[in-house]
Amino acid sequence: MKFIAHIDIMPHDALLDPQGKAVEGGLAKLNLSTLTQVRVGKHIRLQVEADNSGDAGALVDSACRHLLANTIMERFQYRLEELV
Amino acid sequence: MKIGVVVFPGSNCDEDTLFALEQLTGKRPGIIWHKDTELGSVDLVVLPGGFSYGDYLRSGAIARFSPVMGAVVRHVERGGLLLGICNGFQVLTEARLVPGVLRHNTNRRFVCRPVHIKPATTHTLLTRQLDPDRPLQIPIAHGEGNYYIDEDGYRMILDGDQILFRYCGPNGELADEWNPNGSMGHIAGVCNKERTVFGMMPHPERASDALLGMTDGAQILSSLLGLSSVEM
């Protein structure tokens, strides 16, 4: 089976996010100052081949823990979409 | 002491590092290519600054999986010495060879200028010859040097006396105004528990020649190399 994994990686909530702050400043300059609490992360999309969604999830989880995210400063979540 | 300097695609301080070490020891260190899987007989490996693998994903995150890193880890496991400077420090954190991570500078800028640091311990090879009360002037050049570690980790590196340097003012003052990147505890460098792996954001190799205006970096390198004194 083939799946597309949609992975979101975000800085931990407790950490200051300088990129988010910069974007928030940009929004304010567009008179969009009611848009606040901006956090900037990464979105990664990749294809997984596995016997079932459980195995695919385990592979994606391992990829996130060992490379795609640095769990000291980031958290990740993902969803799998089956390719038909 | 036999020294090897690793060159990753995107390293750009390798030549400066080779030059500074050659000036101090009188011998040109070996160059270790990132595709090498053996280091040969070296006592000290240096991971230089730069933008290894374009800093893709996170600084140091891809370099950590370079073929050479397996050999570097075995070198450390054998008790070999390892120094990571700037991007080299980022590689060390990604490889979990030293604790913590390096995040984007809080001021969102790439900061390239001389700063002052002072040793936080003299119980390491890298800092044993330094005066803890004398600030050293040394350049930094990074966008991601904001040292972070969670509370438990911070307590662990304090208890383990693993903080090598802190950013400070010209008279040794510890204050936010002298912290160029927002690092927790003004930390500019840390070592592993075994005190054999050293990571620092400032560039000692760029402050090792009187012609360049700063020589405090040579003192740091000399301490590591066990050279008794530096004459510039």
Image: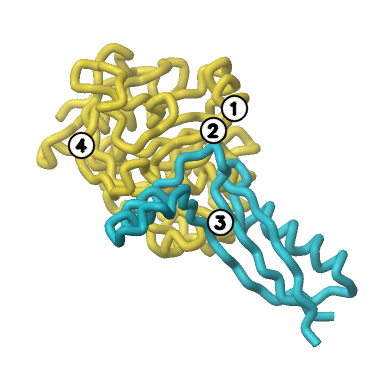
Can residue B18 be seen here? no
Chain displayed in cyan: A
- Tell me which label, 4 or 2, sits earlier in the chain: 4
* Vertical comparison of B170 with B188: above or below: above
Q: Kindly identify the amino acid type of the residue bearing the numbered disc 3.
A: Val
Residue B211, label in figure: none
Chain at tag 1: B
**Which dot, 4 or 2, sits closer to the camera?**
2
- Tell me which label, 3 or 2, sits earlier in the chain: 3
Q: Kindly identify the amino acid type of the residue bearing the numbered disc 4.
A: Pro
Q: Residue B215 lies in what quarter of the image?
A: top left
Chain displayed in yellow: B
Compare residues B81 and A59 and report the one nearer the observer. A59
Rendered location of residue B31, percent (x, y) = 41, 55
Chain at tag 3: B
Q: Kindly identify the amino acid type of the residue bearing the numbered disc 1.
A: Gly
- Tell me which label, 1 or 4, sits earlier in the chain: 4
At a point 40% along the width and 36% down the height, the residue shown is B200
